[in-house]
Image: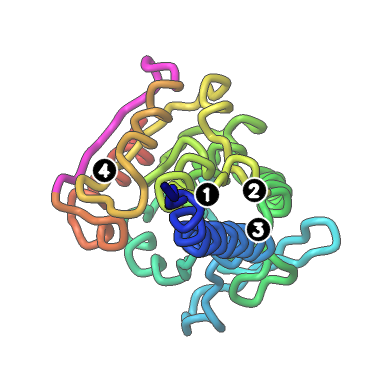
Amino acid sequence: MHMINRSGKTDQKREPVRRTFITVILIAAVAYLAICVYLYLNQRAFIYFPPRGVLYTSEKPVEIRSGEITLRGWVVNEGSDEAVIYFGGNGERPEANIPDFKHIFDNQTVYLINYRGYGESDGSPTEEGLYADALAIYDHVSQSHSKVSVIGRSLGSGVGTYLASQRGVDRLVLIEPFDSMVNVARAAYPFFPVKFMLKDRYDSASRAGGITAETLIIMAGRDEIIPGRSTESLISEFDQDILEVVVIEDATHNDIQNYPQYYRALKEFVTSE
């Protein structure tokens, strides 16, 4: 009697399947690593979106030195004893706020300075660079004003939080803020190890506990960019005795400025005694 060895034939049939499976896994791994490398090398292009040029305005231009960098922007309502410094979002033109800020902060001098690499400011944006610039702007402004309030929106909330942890600002307003860029990036890219990849982290949560200035946080109720849990995490790190939170329920990340309660909250908080 002859025995038929079927196992050898079966193994031969399975071998091409194994090879195909291994090949697919290797291709996927190489593709994943390639994407990681691409994201790492180009990460600042996913954080900073400098608009080209500047909008026309008749307001007075101002230049402020930050090390070897010259920052350029505008000063509105010049001559007041109190000042407001505004740090905008990652793709925002700060001068677009001039008409509204000129009206609601009619008793404050407002400084709207472009980040390095934005508008007509020199250089290229980095976390370290924006922090250095924020200190330079504050030190310049505080020479001429007895009180300096700071407003930071989105990316600018990270800059404003850093500044308030380093200098004695009078009031701090954070619009659509986040706890850290790592957590925002993790929500946007959940399948990548962003914790180990990010260079610019804007870890506001770690600085919030050291801030003593009266602080207002304005949230967009339908924010599709900054996860609500990220803002809530930041809120929990503040001294609750100095903190006020306003939620504009129907607002999204990019249209919060279209709601009257946004400007009302800004004016009431910054201009109150």
Q: Are marks 1 and 2 in contact (CB under 8 Å)?
A: yes
Disc 1 residue crowd, few under 14, some 14–19, many 20+, Cα 10 Å: some
CA separation in Å, label 4 and label 3: 38 Å
Which residue range is magenta in the image?
A: 238-249
In the figure, is residue 100 to the left or right of 56? left
- Residue 258's x, y, as percent? 22, 62
In the figure, is residue 136 to the left or right of 48? right
Disc 3 residue crowd, few under 14, some 14–19, many 20+, Cα 10 Å: some
Q: Give the quadrant of residue 26.
A: bottom right
Q: How is the image coloured?
A: rainbow
Which amino acid type corresponds to the residue marked 3 in the rendered image?
Tyr
Instruction: Tell me which numbered mark, 1 or 3, is placed earlier along the sequence.
Output: 3
Which mark is in front, 1 or 3? Answer: 1
- Residue 233's x, y, as percent? 39, 28
Numbered mark located on residue 192 in the image: 1
Can you see residue 111? no
86, above or below 248, in the image: below
Instruction: Tell me which numbered mark, 4 or 3, is placed earlier along the sequence.
Output: 3
Task: From the image, tell me which residue sits under label 3.
Answer: 40
Task: From the image, tell me which residue sits under label 2.
Answer: 197
11, above or below 205, in the image: below
Instruction: Tell me which numbered mark, 1 or 4, is placed earlier along the sequence.
Output: 1
Which amino acid type corresponds to the residue marked 2 in the rendered image?
Met
Disc 2 residue crowd, few under 14, some 14–19, many 20+, Cα 10 Å: some
228 or 211: nearer the viewer: 228
245 or 264: nearer the viewer: 245
Residue drawn at (47%, 40%) of the image? 183
